Image (tube, rainbow, N blue to C red):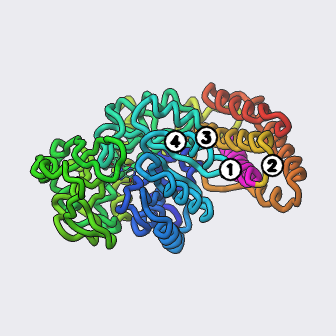
Amino acid sequence: MVDSAGRQALPLALHTPLLDLLGCEVPVMNAGMGGVARHELAAAVGNAGGFACLGMVREPVERIVDEVTAMRALCDRPFAVNLIPSATRADLLQRQVDTCLQLDVPAITLFWEVDQDLVRELKRHSLLVLHQVGSRLDAQQALRAGVDVLIAQGVEAGGHVRGSVGTMALVPELAAMSPVPVVASGGIASGAGLVAALALGAQGVSCGSLFLATHEANAHPLHQRRLCEARADDTLHTYRFYRNWPVAAATRVLPNSVTRGDHDHLRSLREPTVIGTQDDLPVHLFSTDSPLRDASGSVTSMALYAGQSCGQIDTVLDVEARMRTLLSEAASVLAALRRDDSGQHLQDGAEPPASTRERPMPRETLVAALRELLAAERAGARTAAACHKDAYGHAQREQLRQLHEQEVRSCRALLRCLASLDAEPGQAVGDFYQKVMALNTLQERMQLIDKGQQWVRRRVEKLLAQALDDVLRQELELVLRYHGGAQGTSG
Ligand SMILES: Cc1cc2nc3c(=O)[nH]c(=O)nc-3n(C[C@H](O)[C@H](O)[C@H](O)COP(=O)(O)O)c2cc1C
C-alpha cells in the first residue's frame, strides 16, 4: 500500500501512540549524537517521517541557535535537542536551556544522571521531555520528575553506556512499570529489531550507529568505514575515554591505540596531548569527542563509538534510503508473523475474523465513530497544551497538565480500539483547537473545553451501550475514565 506522498503506508502495528505524542509518522528516532547529529542528519530523519534529535551536548549556545535555525529551514516537523547535564558545566547548561526555551524548541532529550530540577523546569515550560536511562532506578527518578518518554538504553549501545542490562531485558521491565511510552535503544539497526522492540513493549526505537552510517551524519568517513566493517563482537566497553566528562563513564567503541593502552603513559600529564583538530578546536588524547567530518590529525586515535548493532550495518546510505529499508523490512517481518493457523498469510485488507465481523453495530460505523473521537481527542490534546502556556498559578497549570495527559492517554486507547478492528487510524485532527483559541479569555476557553469533554463523554457512553467485544469495551471505559477525573474540566 502506498500513501498520497508516494511512501509505503505504515503497517498498523508500527503506528504506536508515541507518534501522536511526538508528532512524527514512524516510530524511529535518531539518537542525539553530539557533533554527529547536526541539522543535516536531524532534518533528513524528520523529513523521512522519524523523530529528529540534534546532538548538542556541551555545544556553545551560538551553535544551538545556528543548528536549530538551519534545522527549521529544512524541516517543519517537531524535533528534540539532546543535552547531557552531568557532562556540562552548570553555567553552560543553564545558558543552553535558556536558549532552547527562547527558541521555543518543542522537545529535549536528556541522558545520564537524572537532573530532576531540570526536568521539572522544562515541564513547567511545557516542553516534551524524553530521558534516556540505563536502569530501573534511573527510570524511576525520571518518571518521578515527570518525563514524557523513557528511552531504555541497553548495554549493547554505542557511545556512552549508562547501565549494564541488555535492551532485550531492560525494555520489557521498564515498559511494565512505566505509565509513559518507552523507546528502545541499543543494538537496533533493522526492521526486525524494530518489530522485536515493539513486541517487548516499546513504542519506538532510537538508533545511533545506524544513523552515523549515513551521508547526512557529520561523522568522519574513517569512523563510518570502521563501523561498517565491524562485527558485533569487535566493539569494546571501556572507561579509557574520559576527558570532557567529569564523572567516570563507560563508552562502547571500536578498538584503537587508546583502547590498547598504547598511550597510557601520557595519562598522568597535567597538560592534555593534542592529537588533532575539529570544529576549529583542538582534540585531546582520551577525549570523549568522536571524529567529525572535518577532523584532521590522528583520527584513528579518537573515540570511534559504535554499538553492537554495527554487525548489521554494512554501508553508508542516505537517511531516506535507510529509513525506507528499515520500514519495508519491518513490514515483511510483520507479514511473516501474521500467518494464520493453516499456514496462510493474513494479508492487509483480508477479511477480519468472524468475531470482529459479526458485530451488531456495523464495523464501518464503529470505525467512523472511533476515528471521529480520535480526531477530537487529538485536537483536545493540542488545545490543553496550548492553554497550559497561558495558565496562571500552580493549581490551574496542574489542572491543564493533567487534562493534556488524559487527552494523550485517551488518544492511545482509541488507537488501540482501531488497531483491534484492523482499521487505519487516519491523521485527522478536529477543529476544536481553532474554536477554543478564537476565544479571548482563559475562562471562556476552559468553559468550552468543559463542553468538549462532555461531548466526548456522551459519545463514548453511546458506544458502550452497544454490544462490543472485551478489548473495545475496556479501552472505551478507559476513555470515559479519563474524561470523568479532572475536577472542573470534566463533564
Ligand atoms: C557516535 C555516537 C555518539 C553518541 N552521542 C550521544 C550523545 O551525545 N547523547 C546521548 O544522549 N547519547 C549519545 N549516544 C548514545 C545513543 O543515544 C544511543 O544510546 C546509542 O547510539 C544506541 O545504540 P546503537 O548505536 O546501537 O543504536 C551516542 C552514540 C553514538 C554511536
**Which of the two discs, 3 and 4, labels the residue nearer the N terminus?**
4
Which amino acid does the dot numbered 3 rest on? Arg
C-alpha gap between disc 4 and disc 2? 25 Å
Q: Nearer the viewer, mark 3 or mark 4?
A: 4
Q: Nearer the viewer, mark 4 or mark 2?
A: 4
Q: Nearer the viewer, residue 214 or 148?
A: 148
Q: Is residue 274 above or below residue 375?
A: below
x and y percent of residue 181 in the render? 53, 39
C-alpha gap between disc 2 and disc 3? 29 Å
Q: Where is mark 3, residue-wise?
A: 412
Which amino acid does the dot numbered 2 rest on? Tyr
Q: Could you tell me which secondary element the residue under label 4 belongs to?
A: loop
Disc sitting over residue 356 in the figure: none
Q: Is residue 463 above or below residue 37?
A: above
Q: Quadrant of residue 476?
A: top right
x and y percent of residue 229 in the render? 15, 55
In this image, 215 relative to 92: left or right?
Answer: left
Please tell me which residue is depicted at 56% across the width and 51% down the height of the picture. 22
Please tell me which residue is depicted at 53% across the width and 52% down the height of the picture. 108
C-alpha gap between disc 1 and disc 2? 24 Å
Q: Where is mark 2, residue-wise?
A: 392
The residue lying furthest to the top in this view is 470
Please tell me whether residue 387 belongs to the stretch shown in magenta.
yes
Look at the image and give the residue range highlighted in magenta: 365-389
Disc sitting over residue 115 in the figure: 4
Q: Could you tell me which secondary element the residue under label 3 belongs to?
A: helix
Which amino acid does the dot numbered 4 rest on? Asp
| Quadrant (top left, top right, bottom left, bottom right) of the C terminus | top right
Please tell me whether residue 315 belongs to the stretch shown in magenta.
no
Q: Is residue 316 above or below residue 263?
A: below
Which amino acid does the dot numbered 1 rest on? Arg
